[in-house]
Amino acid sequence: MDTNILVQAIISGLLMGGIYALVAVSLNLIFGVMKIINFAHGAFMMLGMYVTYWVSVFLDIHPYLSLLLSMSVLFVVGFLIQYGLINRIIEAPEHNQLLLTLGVALFLENLALFLWTPNYRMIKVTTFAGAVHVGKVMFSTPRMIAFGAALTMTLLLYLFLTKTDSGKAIRAISQDREGAHVIGINLKMIYSLAFGIGSACVAAAGTMITPFFYITPTVGLVFVITAFVIVVLGGLGSFWGAFFGALIVGVAESLGEVLLSGSLKQVPIYSIFILTLLFRPKGLFGKRHV
Amino acid sequence: MKKRVKRGVNRREFIKGMGALGAAVTFSGFPRFAHSAEEVKFGVVEPLTGPLAPLGLSDRRGYEQAVDEINAAGGIKSLGGTKLKMMLGDSEGKPEVGMAEAEKHIQAGAVAIMGAFQSSVVFATTQIAEKYKTPHIVGIGVAEKITQRGFKYTFRPIATDAWHIRDEYEYLNYIQKKRGIKIKTIGILYEDTLWGQSSAAAWKRFAPEKGYSIVADLSYPHATSDVTGVISKLKAANPDVVLTVAYISDAILVTKTMKDLDFNTQAIIGMGGGHQDNAYIQALGKLTEYVSVCENWENDVKIPGVKEANENFLKRNGVEMDCVASMCYTCVYVLKDALERAASTDREKIREALTKTHLKSGEKGNIQPSSIIFGEDGQNKDARTVIAQIQNGKRRSVFPEEYAASKPIWPIPKWKDRK
């Protein structure tokens, strides 16, 4: 095996890991911290991508410029879904949440199919497109930018949860719901806020990948299963766990791609996952709480 | 969840129906279904709903256009101008639903079945047709095995999947001879579901006898998030030509990654699927330029009747005729030709007539790039494909030479030399 291919695999794996991190870090807030099994996460990402797509098509602007808009739209969508739907069953057993969020996902995906057809679309970008070649190794520009965004978002979410009152309230609820209620935290509001923030972050992930990834109603599925694995691998609730977990998964998959063939490329990810569950069930970076 | 469609009748409806029928028979004499040939019915089974619905719609338009043309021109002449009538059936893309639809058509008096787009569904519908001794003309469904089961009532005018691959090698031979370019090494790149794997097997089977060596055998999972690894391996192997099959999602990612990695080769030839989809060109624009695709038909092929059929299609539907519509269109004409010769609506006689079909390309509604002559197994012995290349944002037929509207651009310009 050519060493260039291996170096390339590690670099592109790290960059892909950055994209997984974007999805996983936002899922971590909802699934890791709030313990809501959110199957609609991929559908939210898809909606974010479509917001970016239509804004870029109609206003003819670079997809990155629609970042704030797609985040705001999805914040509202997430907030309302939590406020109006999930809050009603927050006390119910977990499988009820799972069914509800799965229902939301199916609804949103089919709505998108109905409104925008299953056609695969892409935004044609000319700036921040392409790739930089260093020697024989290729660095994709939009993926490097996505990597930077993942790092920034991880840091911001970490600071939000540890330094702000709202963040502390979210953590308080995740640790002890009744206790939090007793000291006067508005549960419904804080849950909705957290869910909205998580949805806004995954919309950001969607926006950041549009310069190099196709858009279709089921695109979320490509990333979300991996994101669930990453959140558990990194340790529920740990942001740096989700970030580094994503990098590990990215590199493992990429090395799998060049060393094995076809669908076997996913074998390293799931091997690492099973080993982690067996020997370190709380995850690589897992603590009891954030 | 889908709502369960109510089938059958309850007792009350049955009694009511029988009462009405009894009265009708008493007053009007027994209806003679078999001989009241005011129209000849045939049934189609296509994925009209579900993920393949856009393609099912295209199929339907192809059939409808042929039926309307035939009826407008005076119907089936040997049957005294009897009109053709198409019965629509929705397979929903599922074999078991397709079977039920085929059976329903046959019970309703269809003299033939057509369809069904997916090989998996065709396996099922041809079985029903065989059971009821009803001719089944396979419009689309390219799996080789469909016509290798010894069925007497299955007829397929189009090329099998393996013949697509045979024709890809023929194309390479043609380029070598015509352009004096040496082509030796092949890289194969495919998604690793059944489609990709059976294509890979055929590429490997034909390569030695056609004089090519496969230097890269690369696969990836369908709908994967990244293909940088496989494309960098492809680049390291540096094949003269890349032969590939891909669904559109993967085709988009692969093409983009080839550009990022600055992978250059003499030709990239896909087969149907994503590379044949207009959305592929729309999504990637200039990046798809010079990519070729092996397919059953293209709407610029120089065959008599294609231009008119395409113009009519555009007028009726607002879009140009595509490959799948053209094949369905031709299937109806194959049935028409058989009906004319059989001069009967008896399924057995129609089957007899079908076995003696001899339609030249460009003749009597056969707008495909080959004659239609069915072998013992029901497969059109002459069936062949066309190779189209994306030139100026549109697929142009470039091979075989006698039908091609454009000349192949070979080799593909390097990425850095493109505007």
Image (spheres, coloured by chain):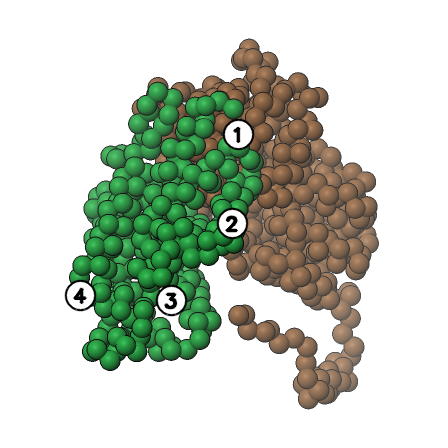
Residues indicated by labels 4 and 3 sit on the same polypeptide chain: yes
Q: CA distance from mark 4 to mark 3?
A: 21 Å
**In the figure, what tint was chain B given?**
brown
The subunit letter for the residue under badge 3 reads A
Residue A235 is at least partly visible in this image: yes
Give the foreground label among 1 and 2. Answer: 2
**In the figure, what tint was chain A given?**
green
Kind of residue indicated by mark 2? Leu
Q: Residue B374: where, in percent of width, then height?
A: 75, 39
The subunit letter for the residue under badge 1 reads B
Assign the C terminus of chain B to one quadrant of the image.
top left
Q: Residue at x 39, y 63 (%)?
A: A38
Q: CA distance from mark 3 to mark 2?
A: 25 Å
Residues indicated by labels 4 and 1 sit on the same polypeptide chain: no
Of residues A210 and B133, the one nearer the viewer is: A210
Q: Residue B258: where, in percent of width, then height?
A: 42, 30
Q: Relative to B103, is B4 above or below?
A: below
Kind of residue indicated by mark 1? Ile
Q: Residue at x 64, y 62 (%)?
A: B97
Kind of residue indicated by mark 3? Ile
Residues indicated by labels 3 and 2 sit on the same polypeptide chain: yes
Q: CA distance from mark 1 to mark 2?
A: 42 Å
Between disc 4 and disc 3, whose residue precedes? 3
Q: CA distance from mark 4 to mark 1?
A: 59 Å
Q: CA distance from mark 3 to mark 1?
A: 46 Å
Q: Residue A36: where, in percent of width, then height?
A: 38, 66
To which residue does mark 4 refer? Answer: A165
Q: Residue B269 got which mark?
A: 1
Q: Residue A36 got which mark?
A: 3
